[in-house]
Each structure stands twice: as structure tokens, then as C-alpha cells.
Amino acid sequence: MKPAQISEEQEWQLFELLEGNLSDKDSAELLKAMEFDPQLKAHYIALKQTYLTPSQVIYPNAQALKKSGAGKRVFFYTSLGAAAALAILWFFKATTVTQPATMSQSNLAKQSLNNESAPKPMKTEPFTVEFNDQAHKGCVTLPDLTARGKQPDGQTVEINPSGSKQPINPLITATEPVRNTKNASDSNKIRSSIEVFTSQNKPNNNAQNASQSQAIVAALSVRPPKTKKELLQSFYQDARRMVENGHLPHIKVKAENRDQDWMPEFQVGLTLEKNVILTSFNP
Amino acid sequence: MTVSEYNKCVDLHSSAIFRFALQQLRNPDDAKEIVQITFEKLWMKRESVNIDTAKSYLFTTAYHSIVDSWRSQKTTEDIDQLLPGKHPSTDSGNYTGLMEVLEKALTQISQIQRTVILLRDYEGYSYAEIGEITGLNEAQVKVTIFRGRQALKDILGNPNNLI
């Protein structure tokens, strides 16, 4: 049976009592009043029933919400280390590409050194110059090879140093004094020091051919294969030179959180002068 | 907030957030989604939220997500009412215990009244803390709780209101 209505002020008093907002004295007075007013007590009981008791509800997927920060931190450093290693490897690869990679060229260098130390009569055996890497393709143009029965896309050029029987084609001439430098930028200087021109219209005599062939040997002999120690020294020298010239070689590490995601993307870049390497890793 | 503190928050508050969302939305899947969204936001804001204020942040975020869910549900219900033969289901089961009756009565009061009563009774929040979560001031929170309890009392006093 629904109790009779009470005033809103009485409702508020009951509410304040149940909320614990009344002083001890006021609470005692109100409880005493309820003993003499059954309707007020009935409303008090009804209002008291509206208070909820916390139920035991357990969220079932709590473990899935947890994060393992330590693992991510290790993964971050692993990714960072891998990125830096790749960038350094790329740099050394770029350095070694500029070095002579064929055995024929190293043989030419040895032959040239032998010739310089102990002058000998020049052998009449033909020797082979091979251009097996992209760097040499770019810097040496191969003109009309069909005169010797070779295709333009062929990678082998036979040159007779004596030139006694056949004209040499193409002719490669060193236009700069040979220097025995060992840094990475030497390859570009060597490239620029070599000119290739055709002798289709102006056939040379044998003496010129011989001297030009010696120049070829001399030019190629300044590029012996470098050891790892020499490569490291070259890298250090180049880096120091870049710093002295105002170009600061550095490894740039950048962490981004583009989409407000909790899986950040790490980017590692190695900047060298105008060449920018950028490798990104997204764990 | 460190990772370990975040994980501690998961242990301490995930069930409370789930219960809060479950009481509001009456759907376990929706409530789980609210919990996931809430903790995902906490993880994203972990740099600016410390462990002392994490509980308040979690309930505030959960409440806002629940309000968004209400809005989308309201849109769906409005569309359902336009379709022939589709009406909001009324669960007229047998309520044996007072708590079950009370939980059913909770669904019949306003959303804001339900929210403040749940925060008050389940989590023991003060009027000021409830005000921070819901955006009301202390007086408004107190009045809202009072009106909500009056409404519950009327519903409990008249069983026909539960059918």
C-alpha cells in the first residue's frame, strides 16, 4: 500500500539523512520524529530501498587491456639498432661500389706498378679491361665497338698495348696527373680524369696508342682494392672533410606517432651531403 | 603514468567501468566496447594522466562514450519506430529480488539521474567528483540524485510501473 504523501521538505530531510549530510543531532531528532510518524517512516524505508548495493561484476578481458612496456622498449632499441646498422651498411656499400671490383683492373694496377719500378719492354699480349659495375657504365662511354666485332652492350674491351697490328678503339686518355689518394671521392676524380673518345674519324698511330694505353693503365692503377681498414679510414677522412666544409654527416633518428596510435613508427635516416637515406621501420 | 601503473589501473578499475557501462547500456558487448575505448584513451593520454586521477579520467571518458552510444542508439530506435511491427522491447520478466526490481527501475529513470546514482552508490563518489565527470555543479548533482531517488521510489511503490 502506497503511503500518504509527505511534504517535499520532509522528503529532503529523509534524503539528507540517508546521504549522511545531517549532523548527529539532526539525525537523532529526525529518527525520533519517525517513531511518532508512521507515514514518514514508510517513506524513509521506501527511499532507503533506492540505494544500490554494488554488485560483483568482473570484466572478463582485463588481461587483454594490459600493456607490456618492457618488450616494446626492447623492440624499440632493436629496431633502432637495426636501422642504424642498415644505414651504415648502405654507406659502406656505396663506398665500395666506387672501388675497382674486377680482378682485371687490379692486375692492371700491379702490372703498372711493375712497369714503373723496373722499366721493361712492353709486352705484346693483349689485356682485358672489364667494366662490370654500374659506376663504370655511367662514366665510361663505349663508342663504336662494332669495328672490333663487339656489341655496344658488351662489357669487355680488348686493347692491344703495342698497337702494332690493329688500331685501338676506344682510346682512353688520362688528362690529370696520377695521384695515389685513397679516399672515397677519388673514384669521381678518376672518372672525371678519363676521357673516352672515338678514333673513327682520326685514326692514331701506333706510338700514340701505346702511350695512351700506358695512361689507361696508370689511371686504373690508382684504384687498388681497399681493405676494410682503409675503407674505415676513408670513411673517417670523408666525414672529417665534410665537417670541415660545413656539411655535418649525422644519423638522424626520428620517432613519430602519426595517428595518435600507441604503436609508434620509428624512422632512421642517414644524411650525407645532398644524398638522403631514409629507412623507416614500423614495429 | 608508467606501464605498470596503467596495468594497475586495469586491475583496479576495469570491472567498475564495465559495471558502470553495463548498467547504462544493458548490453554486455556494448559495455565491453566502452571499456576498451576508455582504456585505449587512457593509454594514449598516459603521459598527462597520473595514477591518482586515473579513476576519474576513466569514468569521465566512459561516461562520454556512453553518451555517444545513447545518441547512436536513439537514432537507431527512432528508425525502428518508423518501421512497421518494430517496437522497443519491454522485458516483463519475473523479478524475484529487490535488486533486480531496482535495476529494472533504473532503466526507467532519466539517463543523467541513472548516471549520478550509479556513480554515487557504486563508486562512492562525492557530489564534486560526480560533477567533474558529468559536467554538472555540486548543487545540480545533489538535486539530480534526489529527483532520481524520488523517481525510483515511486516506481518501486507502484509495481505496475515495472511492467
Image: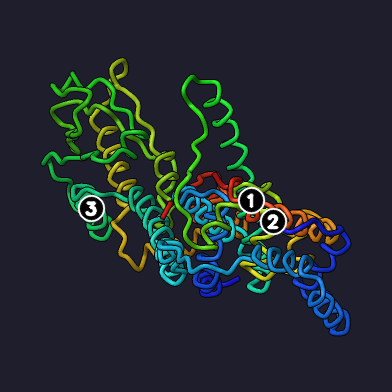
Q: Nearer the viewer, mark 2 or mark 3?
A: 2
Same subunit: marks 1 and 2? no
Give the image quarter of residue A197: top left
Q: CA distance from mark 1 to mark 2?
A: 8 Å
Residue A41, how many percent across, how many down? 75, 70
Dot 3 corresponds to which residue? A106
Dot 1 corresponds to which residue? B158
Tell me: residue B66, above or below residue A240.
above
Colour scheme used in the picture? rainbow
Residue B89, how many percent across, how many down? 49, 37
Dot 2 corresponds to which residue? A2
Residue displayed at 22% across by 28% down: A168
Secondary structure under tag 3 reads: helix
Residue displayed at 72% across by 66% down: A42
Residue A142, how many percent across, how many down? 28, 27
How many marks overall? Answer: 3
Residue displayed at 22% across by 23% down: A152
Tell me: residue B37, above or below residue A210.
below
